Image (cartoon, coloured by chain):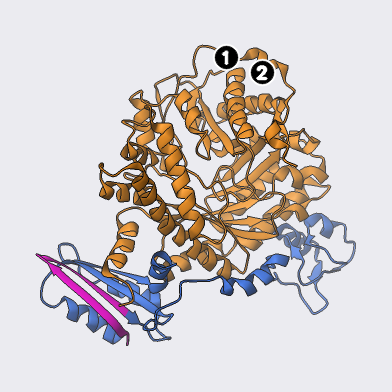
Amino acid sequence: MSRRFLTSEDVRRAGSPEIVVEPGTLVTPQAQDEAERLGIAIRTQAGAWSEPRPDRGPDAQRAQATLPHLPEPPPDEEETPTGVVVTAVGRNRPGILAEITGLLQEVRGDVLSLSQRVTGQYFHLILLVNLPAEASFQDVKQALQCLGGEDDYVVRVMHERVFRFMHRV
Amino acid sequence: MPFQDHEILETLRMFELETLDIRTTTLGINLLDCADPDLESTAEKVYAKVVHHARDLVAVAGAITADLGVPIVNKRIAVTPIAWVAAASGARDLTPLARAMDAAAKAVGVDFIGGFSAYLYKGFTRADLALLESIPSALSSTDHVCASVALASTRAGINMDAVARFSEVVLETARRTADHGGLGCAKLVCFCNAVEDNPFVAGAHIGVGEGETVLNVGVSGPGVVRSALERLGPQADLLAVAETIKRTAFKVTRMGELVGREAARRLGTTFGIVDVSLAPTPAAGDSVSDILELIGAERTGAPGTTAALALLTDAVKKGGAMASSSVGGLSGAFIPVSEDSGMIAAVRDGALSLSKLEAMTSVCSVGLDMVAVPGDTPAHALTGIIADEMAIGMINSKTTAVRIIPVPGKGPGETVEWGGLLGTAIVQNVGAFGCARLHQRGGRIPAPMQGYKN
């Protein structure tokens, strides 16, 4: 019998030492507690029951197949899908570019393009970086955003897809 | 460099300085299969199914923020109107289901779970009545649950019996949460033409045509629009203002589209909609009221406010429509009187009255939102306020709503502090006259000609 749920009331009414359910049946926490209390085993045809992976519904499978086909602004030739945009803004002083590219060298980032402008005391620096597949975006972002400081400069790291989505149709 | 420097800097400025963020990622979960003749079993199933589906929501949102750099402020859940889920049980008190929703929300770490709801616009089922009568108990004994009722629609008319009964429910909810300034009512809203895919609270629920699960997104960009208009300057004409807002709304909504697709993909569910509404917070600069004053009303509530709001709402919709594959939810401008620092100031300074707010709701999408009224407001006056709002929605084929909070022990002009996103409110004056006879008559205001489109 195919049921969506097994509740504690179902367990109490089972009247047998074993309840067999489908792998997709959701056994409520109260049912699990009640079964343990009464010494009843909950199992599927294949063995002990364990919580199934969520089945998001009949639409979901088809939606997952079509989602990649929703048009996105295409990347330019020089970009790759793992592109990361590193932006530094702050007070100009010697050594900033070295600090940033030094850290990028440590994580084996590949600088695809670079743009810099100094206006008076201030600068902004934008690098498009390709990270190697094994690099952790979070770790690299964390490390870069710790560079600089108050009265110095600030680094922000975002995935190039964010900019592509906002500024291209 | 595939992007111009100014494009990169513009995006970063929006996030860092102009409070651009994803206001909410809301997972919708259908609970119709939780129906059971025994209410406790229903509650068990509700808890189990919500936790089963929403367990990863907070982690996925965190991972998207970590991977893309886009902040996602709130993670929420919307469920099937609980009146339908409870119907098979025949129970009179549905508070156990609210408690199950609340426990599930706590277990998965979301801030709100919406859907303690019923559609009452044509009549009451037994379960609908049970839901309505359970609302004061449900909202005063839970933290995260939001309740909503649909009282009217363009196709069905206005169920004035339901409006009258709902007014009493609002007052009772306020009484039961008097210790917190009637805060229970901040989690309660009524609609005309309720939308089925609204990701924002208090009205979030999963309506009758939705699927098993769905991921909906709400963006937040008042600060970005405001900054764009400041840069445009006061000399530009209104067409330029509209165009600037539209282009800005496009960029803001693109973030919602990106996050919506990512969240749906990572959760393995359907990408539903992006609600493009401009949703303010009490934070400085994140105000819809400021935008209205930049467009040209001297203060929000002064002459010109309704026109400015019409321009704003329309421009946001146009920009948002191009930006997203699926626009839905409320998609307008929010004018919550307690959550927007400029709105609070306008009320305090006597610029914004209840009457003007009502006029403004005819051109934006939310209605009377977070309006504090005296705690001793009679039920019939609430009925009148709600019925007026329902009529605006019904005749204009738009969504309107009322989220009204009678604050126990407070009178017009007094302040109540709720804190956090709910902000500060100034109790408004509902006037000296009411509508006791309208309230007593009851019955139905029939569907208007606008509903006959065949």
Percent across and percent down for residue B384 are 60, 21
Tell me the magenta residue range.
Answer: A107-128
Asked whether residue B286 is in view, the answer is no
Chain ID, mark 1: B
Q: Could you tell me which secondary element the residue under label 1 belongs to? A: loop
Chain B: drawing colour: orange
Any magenta on residue A123?
yes
Crowding at mark 1 (Cα within 10 Å: few <14, some 14-19, many 20+): some
Compared with A117, B303 (above or below) is above
Q: Magenta span has B327?
A: no
Sequence-first disc among 2 and 1:
1
Name the foreground residue: B10 vs A84: B10
Q: Which mark is residue B88?
A: none
Q: Amino acid at mark 1?
A: Gly
Q: Residue at 81%, 50% (x, y): give it.
A: B36
> Residue B439 bears which disc, if any?
2
- Which residue is pictured at 43% across the width and 65% down the height? B65
Q: Is residue B196 visible?
A: yes
* Mark 2–mark 1 CB contact (< 8 Å): yes
Secondary structure, mark 2, is: helix
Horizontal placement of B199 versus A35: left or right? left
Tell me where residue B362 appears, x and y as whole percent: 52, 33
Quarter where residue A151 is shown:
bottom left
Which residue does the numbered mark 1 point to in the structure image? Answer: B434
Colour assigned to chain A in the rendering is: blue
The front one of B196 and B137 is B196
Q: Is residue A17 left or right of residue A119?
A: right
Q: Amino acid at mark 2?
A: His
